[in-house]
Amino acid sequence: MNIVDKTYEDQRVILHGNSYRNCTFKNCELVYDGDRSPTFHNNEFVDSVFVFSDAALRTLYFIGNIYHAGEGGQEVIENLLAEIKGGAIHGHEARTIIPPTASHSLGQAGPGVSH
């Protein structure tokens, strides 16, 4: 549904797949469940919060787990955030660098392999 020039106040708004243009959200809970992504253009958010549920919440937990998983994980998430900030998230893979070891592990280099 395309929603234009609407003001929401003191409401719980289920965002599921809607498009919001020139809307104002005042003191609202904006709920995203991880299904169809909503789109936003030129909106105002005043004292409102985003609430992530279901698949969206599981995705946030997954991202947090990657960030704290060990060497390389933080890099993946930092790169992902940079792409989000640049508007470049469009369904592609995020990859770590290939570790410079014979076994491609993140541990010490094997014999004959230097950094």
Image (cartoon, rainbow, N blue to C red):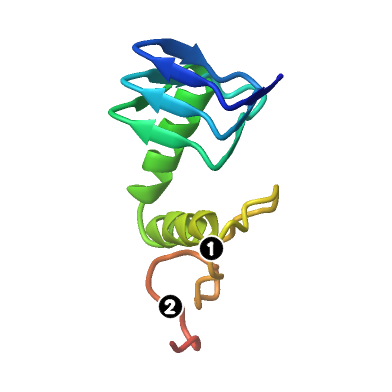
Q: Residue at x 63, y 22 (%)?
A: 35
Q: Residue at x 46, y 83 (%)?
A: 111
Residue 65's tag is: none
Q: Nearer the viewer, mark 2 or mark 1?
A: 1
Q: CA distance from mark 2 to mark 1?
A: 17 Å
Q: Nearer the viewer, residue 55 or 24?
A: 24
The reply to whether discs 2 and 1 touch (Cβ–Cβ < 8 Å) is: no
What residue would you read off at disc 2? Answer: 109
Residue 64 point in image, percent of width and height: 37, 41
Residue 55 versus residue 71 in the image, above or below = above
Q: Dot 1, crowdedness within 10 Å: few (<14), some or many (≥20)?
A: few
Q: Dot 2, crowdedness within 10 Å: few (<14), some or many (≥20)?
A: some
Dot 1 falls on a residue whose secondary structure is loop
Q: Residue at x 63, y 29 (%)?
A: 37
Residue 59 versus residue 31 in the image, above or below = below
Residue 18 point in image, percent of width and height: 65, 23
Dot 2 falls on a residue whose secondary structure is loop
Dot 1 amino acid type: Thr
Residue 33 versus residue 67 in the image, above or below = above
Q: Quadrant of residue 52?
A: top left
Q: Nearer the viewer, residue 12 or 107?
A: 12
Residue 96's tag is: 1
Q: Nearer the viewer, residue 39 or 98?
A: 39
